[in-house]
Amino acid sequence: MTQQSISEKHKQLTELNLDIESVKAQVEAVLSSELYWFPVRHHSPNVALNLRKVMVKRKPRVVFIEGPSQANDLIPFIIDTKTKPPVAIYSSFRDDGNMLGLAGIASAAEDLPPVFPVWYPMLQYSPEYVAIKVAHEIGAKVVFIDLPHYARIKSAKPVEVLTSEKPVSLDSHPIDESRVSDEIVASIDEIEPHPDALIDEGSDEQIDERIKRELEEGSEHLIVESRFYQELAKTAGYRTYEEAWDSLFEMRSFDDPEVFRKEFSAFCAASRATTLPVRMILDSTIDRERHMLRSIDRGLAEMNLKASDAMVVCGGFHLFMDREDKNDPPTPPGGTVYNTIVPYSFFQVSELSGYAAGTRAPQFYQRVWDLQNEQRFDEVYVEHIVAVLTEARKKGNVYSSADAIAVAQHTEMLSRLRGRTIPVLDDLHDALVTCCCKGDPLEEGGPLFTAIDAADIGHKIGKVTKELGQLPVVADFYSNMESLDLGEVLGKEKRLNVEVDKRESLGEQRSVFFHRLRFLKVPVCALTEAPSGDFTSGKLFREKWQLKWSPSVDSALIELNIYGDSIERAALAALRKCLKDDQDSAGKIAQHLLRSVDMDLPDMVRMTEDSLSDAIDNDVRFISLVQALTTMLVLDKYLIYRNLRRGMLDDLIVRCFDRACFAILDVVAAPEEQQDQVVSMLVALAEVTQQGDKQNLDRNLFAQHVRDAADASPVPFLKGAFLGILSELRELEPTELADFVRGLAKSSVEVMVTAGDFLDGVMAVSRTSLMLGADSLIKAIDELLRAAEWEPFLVMLPKMRAAFERMHITHRDSLASRVAEIYGLKAASSLTELNISTAAAVTVARLDKRVAEIMKDWEL
């Protein structure tokens, strides 16, 4: 580095208002204190390596670790030899008494307690995991000291806020006014709103995601936001924090762990010195640090140990917490807390999965850890290049040894060019793209980027010792998976396609189990092909499912504990709740009836039938009633074929059909956004009457109400649909449809221009009858177009075009042939001949060009 660049960097640090001597003093005070503090970054192999060296040398009697204090009882199971990372401490809090006021905001309903889960992943090279393992080896006690996550969740109740006039309390934690500068107070308005301040805005999923993100982030985002880091990144040319971290700390060899400790501590001290204190209040950093300090003091007192007997392992940002802060941390709210350890995967801990505190390349850093321990650190990037190209070859891409050599050489060149002694992952990625991407990376780089992601992330999945035990509902899930011969899915993040035939015993059992899991939203199976109503092909009983296990399966199962101790009981309880919530909707209750049969819950079938009977009598919504009817008819076919009890289903079908017919008049003026669904349900009801499977369904009742609706509807599109249905039922002659169109041709312009909407409605429902009466309809449309002036024609044209687009291509071709014949062409082959004068042909060409210009900007 030149003297000029050194001077420039010193100038930039001065402009930051960073008191370098003060930072040095803070670092020296912390590093020389009687209590030994070691700064860490989550999932860093180099931090873990240096931490292990220090612990083996110092042999502390107790190690305080930044981990969830509510999970201290799980430490013996983490160090169990049968527990193999990646694993995660899973902790969930259920607010049974709605202490936070978030029921109905962070949960689906006000009577459903919100649940707040959080995961603390541990990889083989995570410093916290290494600290726990080494502590066990040297006989030291381990204590987690972090604030429980549920004490950090902000209540939905209004809280006092900071103003630029005077700093006041925020979330019941006072701010020492003497320690808040005018500059900080004045800059509060510049801070982006804290996610929890928006707790009453957005969907349940958005709120859950905000809370999840805030609980996962830790303190690293404060370093990234700090003015010190921002200026450092700009000066050094770091494109991301990951690149900065790898350059400064990860991909460096430190002969003395104390050198690493001092450098990282100084980096964190400078970052904290240029971070607004109010940011640390808003994201609960101060609350967490208060809890850490109290936990350390209490732990030393309870164990009757001196500070020199202990060691603290925590994020580097926390090394410089205010040790004079006498305020108490927040008290966790009362509720149900459940803690366990679950298997995790490299993908789940990667940034690609959306994990806020994830690592970008778990498998790459696993390789760093392994080769460091084998004293082959300088071979990391070469081995990873080979891994990437191997993944690419698996997908059919051809790369030679020469490509690998070129990438290695280019990686070294980029590293030296960027002032690094050891290449980092960014150098390797850039070299791969430069040497292996044959063309524009945005267009040709897809396969290569897929291979890079595969090699970076890996597929490793952890295991948890069986000594820990499982909740009954979790144990029931795994027991069912084994008994149904589905064990190959477990512990693998690969998709498995399963086809079941419900006429076979194993197929029926699998189907029931899959439907229960799907209903309970356990993310392990997806129905890719549902049964059809075809008896002859047997598809009524065939289903296709796709199965894939992931660590989120266990967390979903744990949350089911509120509903019961088995999958079946959880499904029963959840379905009862759905019946209560949807009691006024015949369509939804009918779906629940089908689910109760799919899930083989006989008691619920009877209960659902009773609920459906009440819903049919009280529901007046046409769409809901037709949905109920079509669902019951599907169920009826299944029950008939299996010779199962049909109970009151026949009576429910008849009553629902009648109620749906009476409700048709209620949708004659449906708003535009509902019209397509109304027409879809109208077609479904018409098909029911035409199929004739149910002789006791009154076809005349349906036809009469459709006719009444056609007379009453003020909406041209719906009027066309109603008349089209009558034509399909042979209750209306095609010529009558044509007469209606002729009537529009003779009407005022305001009425005439609705012809496009009318025809769109007709063709949305009518097929066979339309073709039978094609001649009369064509002539009526011809009269309409001849009667229309240019402007009305332009208004009608888009809808008329949309109407004909609804027709199947064969029907359109047939209609086109009829048009040609009516206009004097004897056969389809004659369409290529236009027997008109040259002048007329020129005029037609001009008209065609003009129409094309006009329609160019139309949104059809």
Image (cartoon, rainbow, N blue to C red):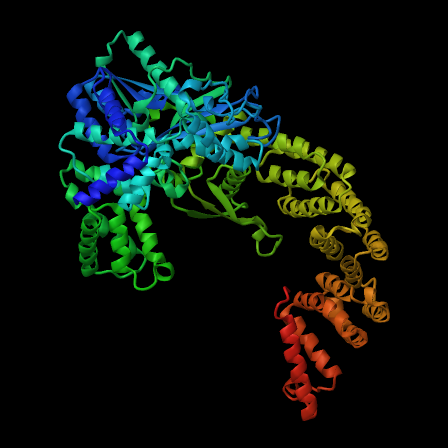
**Res 486 → quadrant:** top left
Q: Using the rendered image of the protein, determine whether residue 568 is visible from the camera's viewpoint.
A: no
* Relative side of 419 to 441, left or right: left
x and y percentages locating residue 562 in the rendered image: 53, 25
Q: What residue appears at the point 76 percent right and 54 percent down from the top-left corner?
A: 689
Q: Using the rendered image of the protein, determine whether residue 484 is visible from the camera's viewpoint.
A: yes
Q: What residue appears at the point 82 percent right and 47 percent down from the top-left corner?
A: 662
x and y percentages locating residue 464 in the rendered image: 33, 29
Q: What residue appears at the point 69 percent right and 86 percent down from the top-left corner?
A: 843
Vertical side of 693 occupied by 14: above or below: above
Vertical side of 127 occupied by 437: above or below: below
Image quadrant occupied by the N terminus:
top left
Vertical side of 646 occupied by 112: above or below: above
Q: What residue appears at the point 30 percent right and 22 percent down from the top-left corner?
A: 65
* Relative side of 588 to 71, left or right: right
Image quadrant occupied by the C terminus:
bottom right
Q: In the image shown, does 3 or 456 lie closer to the viewer?
A: 3
x and y percentages locating residue 281 in the rendered image: 43, 25
**Res 620 → quadrant:** top right
Q: In the image shown, does 357 or 763 lie closer to the viewer?
A: 357
* Relative side of 584 to 96, left or right: right
**Res 815 → quadrant:** bottom right
Q: In the image shown, does 675 or 166 lie closer to the viewer?
A: 166
